Image (cartoon, rainbow, N blue to C red):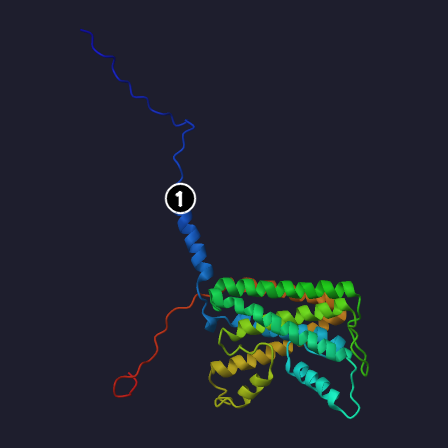
Amino acid sequence: MSLPAPVVERRRSQSSSYRRPRSSGADDATIVTVKGFFLEEIDEQRATVPLVGYCFMTGFLNAVCFSAIFAWCASQTGNTIQLSIAIGRLLDKEPDHLYRLSDRLALISLLSFILGGFVGRIGERVGYGARVWLVCGTLLQALLTMGAAIALWRSHMPWYADPGSGPVWTTVLAFLGYGFMSASMGLQGVMAKRLNTQFATSVVLTSIWCELISEPKLFHLRRVVVDRDRKILTILFMLLGGFSGRCVLDEVGPAITLGIAAGLRLIISGWWLLIPKKTERKFDEENDNGFEK
């Protein structure tokens, strides 16, 4: 009777082309981590840098449009009143049916601002404090600003209006550029407002001046008062933005100035990635007798 042949175990050499399939667990964990990072809510109380950047951009862009047309792309109070006056002229004894250039510019700015503000409501889907929305929303502001730069570059319109003269942006492309600027301001205003900080009114200063003057701790100069100091920062950076915008505009013109503004918005967009996420804060609670613990 013959025995079966012995079984020989063959070991694969180290040089074999066989590779262990890569585990997808690490990749999935990385994806989840990145997704969670972008969807987490930022701590708006520690977002001073990008928010003062918003205030700076308000002054910067307003310097460009006011130098050419004596109108603002951010503050819509004047545009609203101007349109109401235009409607009131229709009721004069001798009705004025002339659709003036300043009225057209005011209407374009107001409608574009409102449209940009409605675009800002997209943040409701992911959360106004979500990192992904703040990054993408600010990036959209940069794209609108770049669109304004291209439109004004192609319009070949002058950037400066002489005292006593009227607006110098009179072409369709110039109107389009002005609309892009106003839309970016509307989007910025809604994004800052919904963060509910002292920088909420990043597009106007009237309410900030009123709040600062009425601040109970305005003259407490030897201590840090967060609310008061942030109002002061809002005013200072808006003034700095207007000053910087006018200086740059005098050197390179409106198209390049708006191109620089778009680059600054890109920096602000990236800065939102550096803001820490919001953590739970413990506040003092009152006990049953109404006294603080």
At horizontal 64% and vertical 65% (from top left) the residue drawn is 144
- SS state under label 1: loop
Q: Nearer the viewer, residue 2 or 102?
A: 102
Type of amino acid under label 1: Ser
Q: What residue would you read off at disc 1?
A: 24
Query: Looking at the picture, how far across and down is residue 151, in whole percent?
Result: 73, 64
Query: Looking at the picture, how far across and down is residue 194, in whole percent?
Result: 50, 74
Query: Looking at the picture, how far across and down is residue 247, in whole percent?
Result: 72, 73
Q: Nearer the viewer, residue 252 or 162?
A: 162
Image quarter of residue 63? bottom right
Residue 33, visible in the rendered structure? yes
Query: Looking at the picture, how far across and down is residue 101, in whole percent?
Result: 77, 78
- In the image, 56: left or right of 153? left
Looking at the rendered image, the quarter that the N terminus falls into is top left
Tell me if residue 180 comes above or below residue 97 in the rendering.
above
**Label 1 environment density (alpha carbons within 10 Å; few <14, some 14–19, many ≥20):** few
- In the image, 186: left or right of 277? right
Residue furthest bottom in the image: 93
